[in-house]
Image (cartoon, grey):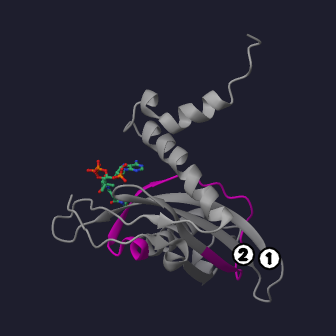
Amino acid sequence: MTNDKKMRAKKVSESTATMTEMVMPNDTNPLQNLMGGNLMRWMDVAASIAAGKHCEAHVVTASVDHVSFHKPIALGDIVTLNARPTRAFNTSVEIFVEVFAADIKGGNPRKCNHAYFTFVAIEDETRKPKPVPEVIALTGEEEKLYESAARRREVRLVLSGRMKPEEASELRALFLSFEPNDGN
Ligand SMILES: CC(C)(COP(=O)(O)OP(=O)(O)OC[C@H]1O[C@@H](n2cnc3c(N)ncnc32)[C@H](O)[C@@H]1OP(=O)(O)O)[C@@H](O)C(=O)NCCC(=O)NCCS
């Protein structure tokens, strides 16, 4: 890992990426709805653009939190993906991706799903992880996403076996704060 003393913290809006696609026949399943794997690919691309812009580096996908598909997206629909950084850690940054769809006339606008991606910035020469700039959260929603990112990070690190559950201090604090009063 190298030190980059010139790294400056960046606002969420500086790295937000918006991507628009039309669902074409090749993107669909036999029911003529967008195939889940194709949507995940678009989400990965949009998220990696936001992560790359934030880190000003090549990035690799380290993990994707669970993705559920709430609403089908039909052939011919316009899909808009919005990806933005929530919080940076040492060499990784979490990206929040939201997916919206509507028909070509703007009818039936809806949010279809969202997911959190984690990307790691990679040093060009060594191909090793490199430090990333901090994320500056300005709006109320950005602050909430920033604050909760620490808990999501612990969940994914514990589930991937990279952190012992007893080391997950943010999660412990959350559960302890919800501990029911035992009457003593
Ligand atoms: C992601 C990768 C670079 C991590 O490499 P590593 O040698 O484990 O590096 P480190 O232990 O220094 O971890 C680097 C960062 O990755 C994060 N990370 C690693 N695995 C993770 C996971 N499963 N979920 C979330 N973050 C993870 C670490 O928390 C660390 O972040 P931090 O520095 O902000 O704390 C490496 O596993 C890799 O190259 N994976 C393949 C990536 C890829 O090809 N993606 C496309 C899939 S087709």
Q: Is residue 12 left or right of residue 120?
A: right
On-image quarter of the C terminus: top right
Mark 1 sits on what residue?
A: 109
On-image quarter of the N terminus: bottom left
Amino acid type, callout 1: Pro
Q: Is residue 37 left or right of residue 184?
A: left
First of labels 2, 1 by sequence position: 2
Badge 2: how crowded within 10 Å, few (<14), some, or many (20+)? many
Horizontal and vertical percent for residue 74?
A: 73, 74
Asked if one can make out residue 52 in the rendered structure from this viewpoint, the answer is yes
Asked if the residue at tag 1 contacts the one at tag 2, i.e. Cβ–Cβ closer than 8 Å, the answer is yes
- The answer to whether the beta carbon of the residue marked 1 is less than 8 Å from any atom of ligand 1 is no
Residue 175 is drawn in which quadrant?
Answer: top right
Give the SS element for disc 1.
loop
Amino acid type, callout 2: Ala
Q: Residue at x 16, y 64 (%)?
A: 126
Horizontal and vertical percent for residue 101?
A: 72, 75
Q: Which mark is residue 101?
A: 2
Q: Which residues are magenta?
A: 52-81
